[in-house]
Amino acid sequence: MSDLTDLLIKLIPIFPLLAVISNGLLGSRYSHDMAHRLAWGSVGLSFLCVVGVFADILRTGTAHEVIVYQWIFGGDLTINLAYLVDPLTCVMLLVVTGVGFLIHVYSVGYMHGEAGFTRFFTYMNLFMVSMLLLVMGNNYVVLFIGWEGVGLCSYLLIGYYYDKVSAAKAATKAFVVNRIGDAGFLVAIFLIFVNFKTLDYTKVFAQVGQLSTEMATAIALCLLVGAVGKSAQFPLYTWLPDAMEGPTPVSALIHAATMVTAGVYMIVRNHAIFDLAPVAMDVVAFIGGGTALFAATIGLVQTDIKRVLAYSTVSQLGYMFLGCGIGAYTAAVFHLMTHAFFKALLFLSAGSVIHALSGEQDIRKMGGLSKKIPWTYRLFLIGAIAIAGIPPLAGFWSKDEIMAHAFVHQHFLLYGIAAVGALLTSFYMFRLTYVTFYGTSRMDHHAEAHVHESPTVMIGPLVALGFLSLVGGLMLGFPPEHGWLHRFLGPVVGSAGEHEASVGVVIALMVAATAIALIGWGLAHYIYHVSPPTADAWAQKFSGAYTTLMNKYYVDEIYDFVIVEPMKRLGAMLDWFDRTVVDGLVRGVGQMADWGSAGTTWIEKYIVYAGLNIIGYGNHLAARRGRKVQSGMVHHYVAIIVAGLFLLALVVQFLVQM
Amino acid sequence: MLEELTAGFPILSCILFLPVLGAMALWLLDDEDMVRTSALAITLVELALSVFVLLRFVPESAAMQFAERVRWIPALGISYHLGVDGISVLFVGLTAFLSVLVVVYSWDTIRHQVKLYMMCLLALETTTMGVFVSLDLILFFVFWELMLIPSYFLIKLWGGGAERHYAALKFVLYTLLGSVFMLVGIALLNINFHQWASLHHTDQSYSFDLLELLSAPIPMDQQILIFWLMFMGFAFKAPIFPFHTWLPDALLEGPIGMAVVLAGLKLGTFGFMRFSIPLLPDASQSETVVTVVVVLGLCAILYGALMALVQPDFRRLLAYSSISHLGFIVVGLFSLNYQGLQGSLLTMINLGFSTAGLFFIAGFLYSRQQSTQLSAFGGMAKQVPLLATFFLIIGLASIGLPGTNGFVGEFLILLGAFKAKWWFGAVAVLGVIVGAAYFLWYYERAMLGPVGKAVKQTMSDLQLREMVIAVSLSVMILWIGLYPSPFLRIMNGSVQALVDRLNHGTVAALESPAAEKGR
Amino acid sequence: MVAVFFAYFALVSIAAGVLTVSLKNPVHCGLALLALLMHVSGLFVLLNAEFLWAVQVIVYAGAILVLYLFVLMLLNLKADERYFHSSYLYFLGPAVGGACYVLVLLLRSPYGGVKGDVPAAAVLEHGDTYAVGIKMFSDHLLQFEIIGVFLLGAIIGAIVLAKTPKSIEDVTGKK
Amino acid sequence: MGEYALLYILFAPFAGALALIMVSNRQPMLVRGIAASAAFVSLIASVYLFYAYDPVKGGFQFVQKFEWSRQLGISLHLGVDGIGTPLVLASSVLLFTGIFVSWHIRDRAKEFYIWLLILAAATIGVFMSLDLFFLYFFYEMSVIPMYLLLGMWGSHTKQYLEMTDAEGLKLRDSVGFIFNFGSNSKEYAAMKLVLFLSAFAVAALMGILLIYKYSGLDTFDILVLREQAHLMNIPVLGTTLDKIIWVLVFFGFASIAPLWPLHSWSPVGHAAAPAATSMLHAGVLMKLGHFSIIRVAFEILPETTREMMPIAAVLCMFSIVYGGFVAFYAKDTKYVIGYSSSSHMGYVFLGMAALNYISLSGAVIYMFAHAMATGMLFAMAGWVYDQTHTRDLPSLGGLSNKMPFISGCFIVGCMASIGMPGTVNFIAEIMIIVGSWEKYPLQVIVAVLGIVLTMAYLFKMMRSLFYGPMNQKYSHAHDAVSVVDRLPLLVMIAVSVGFGIFPMHLYDVVRSGVDPLIARITQVVPVAQSGDGLGVRGEATIPPATRHVPLVANNPVPLIPHLSRGNE
Amino acid sequence: MVPLSAYVAVSAILFITGLLGVLIRRNFIIVLMSVEIMLNAANINLVAFSHYLESLAGQLTALFIIAIAAGEAAIGLAIIIVVFRGKISTNVDEMNVLKW
């Protein structure tokens, strides 16, 4: 059985990989039908494998480690391409393949007729491969392969409509911002290797006790940087809203359900290290809480349907981080799962809306759609209720668990933040619902004429997700703190800082949470359904805040101003430096040689050469005078001879006297 | 440990001289197509031989294999000594591989003086091979210098830029300037060996043989001096920041084929690995040297990357990215630990595929738009999706995306750097970020978005020959990225030997009187 | 007694020399030269060189001077008004000064030297002519012969030089 | 037969010259044929000499002695050692190639060849003289033909030719004459060359005569003088006689070498001379200086040489840099090559100054190598001049299309001149560097920078000659196509590259000449006896001591101690 | 006894006289005569030394000088005649064609 499980584990990423290869290389040779069948078929097969593995793990409760091959090795370093499947991985695998499968199916309908149909599915499958590697890897480097791989696929899929400037820019931005996080992650990996001489989870966690707190904090913070980048937390969240340039299934799969949760997965996976670093934990919690609130405020005023959902995603991820930061790992994973269900549902429903409206995303140009696309409307509503945290839908259980954990563990500030965030979440989700589906239609007529319900292939997955959103929370996490999920994950994440709260407190908190959600709903109902002008009035009244929120706190602009522009300017400056100073030095040396040679030539010309010539010229002049001596007169010659004789005599006499 | 495994058949000599003999044979041909075909045949045979060597190479061994040794100038200790070990054997294959691709690339892009071009190319291949397989320092220097001649003419005669004469001269002078210093360094090694040998009454009183020089201890101050002298040679060639300004010029003005060889074959850093570090282990480990060199490397990483960020010309960008990568390699080398050295070595090989590949891409772009300026591009992916795809694949390899070869090398380098000193790695990691930024930003502006104004409407996607180049490069990139084990196995033995030599450190201990008495 | 003769010969020969270079009429100069030669021969006698005296009188006074006079008459030269060079004073002054200087030097010189093998007594035994003859035809034979050849050459040269050249027309005409 | 090789080499050109006197200029082929065959005889004999010279035996071989004047102690004493042999070979190679290079001379070809043969013969005579008198005799004899060769068959500089207006003509003959650097007539060059060299030759002659006088041996025979002359420490004029003699001899001969600052005649002379003459002159005549210094100063005054040679080490630096710089700036092909020659002679002086086996061997090999390299360059500069009638670099260009062969050979010539590996120059360069470092590190650095400089100006010249846009004026220029035109270049390339790749015999020969000389000068028995390297040639075996050399060298395999040396 | 110096002095004075004649006279024949005076002065010197040093070499040399004087006179006068034929003058100032 174990061998079969190992084989299944090995097979999980292989099916999508084969689909990638087939679609990538031969996709242009066969029909779209073939391509999408391969795509969702492969994911489906993976899902089946996952189920098989899950069944085994559920039965035995043991983790499986499977080595595929030696990847990088030499000296004291060995990195295998190896899988570790434990309950945590299993949960992630189920989410990834399950939700992934549904979204693949949905895409068949949504992407129908697009030019890059095959390309889309290739990328999607590649994403599945990467994501699977990410969650299955038994060491940090395989995790990192998946980590970067999903980043790449995110890049590719955001840039799917590459001829749109905004899409291209968003894609680049997503990759680069992710890369910042990845750099931090890399540093963490190196620090781990330097400290443990290995990168395998099992070996690392086995020795984690010997880590000093400082080192643990350093590693944890570096890991956090990675997680922040990938999971779009403050301050690296800005890429995620922009990522909505991709097709909607992409947003659903990557930017809601799976990839962005990788950071959470990573933190949970490394909880042993985080547990050693309380400071880092606090940082995680506050980043999570802060992001949850921050993103929720922005979500209040956005007008793009997908952007609202994107900010909501950021916000929900903040909850997960918050959960991690306060040690509620199971709750974080729980929220991860439920969020995968309902956010996928929301995104896909939004996609269905967009599909119905021939690509319109601005909610100001929607309205009154509930009649026209009833299925979509109903499913969207389920999603909204789920995310708002109204029992008994999925979102309530997980979010409440995090908040309760915060409360019970005396993180009251965080609890407060989370509560406000929950209120805002509820408000903006229902705002979205009302603006989109109620009221009068604000569509242009051209679009309105074509409004239609989506085909079954799209609605089908929606229904499945809707079902999960409805019952997922109860199924997995009821009763709170003691649900099935908790038992299942227990061996992996442990029960760090279990603080058994009394039933009364739990129920009180549940009631409070429900109340908060309902208040948010009520507000939205009042403002956007009962008296729509209120919204504009308030916007007028708080125009400063409104504009700030509308412009997302100007964070992008600030980043541009503080980082991107200076960077470019620095580059330009260095370019100038390189051309003038560095190259100038070289040219200067050349110039020096040139001058040197000119100078030397000058010396040659005017000193050496001319010096010799002056001797010659002196001779010349002397000869011009001296030739007069050659008068041709014999007596002159004789006189000279005699004079010479006299001189000679004098010399001789002089010498004799000496 | 480093004994030579001498094979009977002088296959390295065959590899070494086949191209140049082929070049001479080309002289006799007149028909241009015939010339092209013959050149391709020669490089293919060369590649086959190289692959044979790679296959027959015994991995996980530090020995010099396929060694050949003939006395050349015995009195000076100069011999014709060839051999490959784990450090150099991959370069043999890489050189042969790239040569084939360059010939394929040049098939229809070089239109005038085809014969001469091919001859220069083949001569360049011989000299490059010579650099990699020489085990005698003089022989090495011979090829090192001879390389300049075909390079000079390739840049000068077939370069596309207006400044190509200047660039060619700058390249040659720059390199020569460095290498004359290196020559002095080599001479000093020889003198040192001579002094040592005459002290120990051995037979050979002079020697330039790498293996023999390794056996002679070198006093520390002498090591430092020689190190810097040789550093000049290698740093100028590599080029290491701030000696790099010839590179953008040469790459920009020269033909693509030349750029591929210049940027793809990291001769300078190979020199460090082959000669500087093993011959001068103590100097290489000394605080000052390591700090200075690594800081230069780090500067190069960031400097190159930032420079690349703002270059509007793709080839110039590649030049600076090359400098940035060389910074990585240098940092890895002078981390002086296993991972650093291994990573550097692997990265040198990797860049032979990725940087060289990007130059091919630049060539493809150039042959379509007659320019590699950004202003000539924009939204090209619409017109040439295949080209864009391969551009992306190779580019991602160059920025070290996991799954491509770039990652393996870069990861090892950074790991090694971290092991050496944490801040080496910490600074180097920043290069990873900017690296992604400059490539993707350029890619975005050139390939994505709406179709640019200057882009020709009638642009064809990759031709068959271009496909061959792109596909073979991509295959190599993914191979090394996903399954680097064969390559790592080949280099492991030699890298281990190198690390051992570094660890055992100085041989100068022998010079102490106690050791003398002991024997 | 010898001193008196010496003074006579010396003074007269000096005077004759001065006249030779200073007289206007070349013929007079020739005659003064004759006087000079005669008195110099007298000095030779005082020095026991009788053979040389004879040669001086015969060859110099007899042959050479006659040659001069013949040429003078042949050319029929008149006394020249400007018979000195215009610049003769440039030469005269230094020459006289230099001469005085040399004279002083000469008079102060001791003139010692290695004595030869023919003291006056030996010469007087067989006569000067004998001594000179023996010497000339033994030790200095080669020089004597050379002088002979030289004289022959001089004669031939003189003839060649002084011969009236044939006019060019004659030469061509004969051809 | 074989032992008369020197006589063949020396007198074949003389005989050729004599024979040429007999024939008429109206039979050009006969004239050339006689000249070429005389040169060929000389060449064959010197090749024989070179390979028959036994480096193991060493010393002076092929000795011939004919008494000339017993009273004065003069005899025609000929013989070559390891230093003279390669130079004799170089001379005859250059003579042979020079004949072909000047194949197309129409104007008084016979006389040209006569003088060329005499020039070469005299040069060869110096290289084989073992008698100071004849050494000087041939030395002077080699200078005089230059006058005629330059004055009659030479060429003017561009500026000179341009000075056709009245102003220019006046300038030629007035104070402007002092600054006529760029505007020389060939007559000027000839006069300058001959006067300069003769003047310094007289200094050398004085030195020679002082040796003759004060050795008290009444002989000019070098072999006798070097064994018996004791000129040390004779006080005169506040110093010692040997130093005076040394200075006279050194500077007297260094003028032709030419050592900075005595170089001024040489570029002008080279520039004005016809190609073949430049070749011979730059190729071998300049080496007369070094050779004579070695023969006279090194052989006869070894101790003084040891003391005084640093002078050369200082001046050689200037030589290298100065010549290189001026060459870089020069606008005239032959000036560039001329100054490069005078720069390169600095390397020879450096090699000589270090007084060490390796470096002096390097210097001698450099002489040989430079002869070939500069011969090539001058031959090709001459070809370009013949085709374009100008040596002015700015007005030339783009000729590589017109003359691919010449430009190809020119590259080889440049590479050889730079000391590119593969040419014999490289061997010489590296030997000089290896040998001189210990004593003169600064000079070595300057020298290697000089290599870069060399490359700079040669490439610059190459570019302005052969690449870039072509002046249409020169469209009629054509390549060297016939065998006669190509032969000389190919011969020189073959020699240069051949010895570059197989320098063993050359090295052995030179070492056999250098070793005893250095031993005499340093008075130390060499540790590195060249005997090891001499016998073994081209064997693929690895000596046992070095077969297993570990990479980890602090644990080396014990090297087999050599019992025959040391340890005492 | 007349001292040697006296003879030498006489000879010197005569020599100077002859020399002056050569230098300042314009008539070529007189110049030749002056040369004869110089030769005689030399002869006196030679004979005087011969006498005082008791060697016959001086006398013999004087004898040869006389012979040379004869030759000189013959050639010189011949030249004068040739020149006179061409120039109708014996003025040395006019015989300067050999100058530069």
Image (spheres, coloured by chain):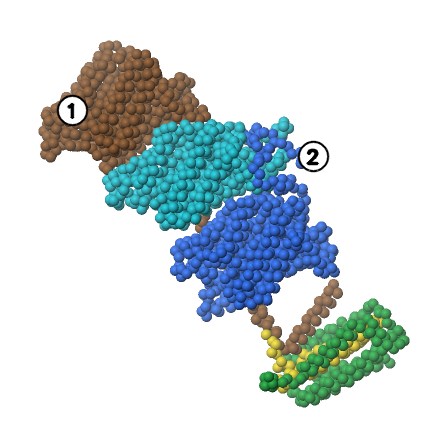
Chain colours: A brown, B cyan, C green, D blue, E yellow
Q: Nearer the viewer, residue B288 or D224?
A: D224
Q: In this view, does A398 lie to the left or right of D170?
A: left
The picture places residue C63, in percent across and down from the top left corner, at 76, 84
User: Helix, strand or loop at disc 2?
Assistant: loop
Amino acid type indicated by mark 1: Thr
Residue under the image location 63 percent in, 56 percent down: D8
Pointer 1 residue: A456
The picture places residue B127, in percent across and down from the top left corner, at 46, 42
Would you place residue B438 above or below residue A489 in this image? below
Q: How far apart are marks 2 and 1 (CA)?
A: 103 Å
Quadrant holding the N terminus of chain E: bottom right
Pointer 2 residue: D568
Task: Establish whether labels 2 and 1 are both on one chain.
Answer: no
The picture places residue B305, in percent across and down from the top left corner, at 37, 37
Q: In this view, does D391 lie to the left or right of D4?
A: left
Quadrant holding the C terminus of chain E: bottom right
Residue under the image location 19 percent in, 30 percent down: A112
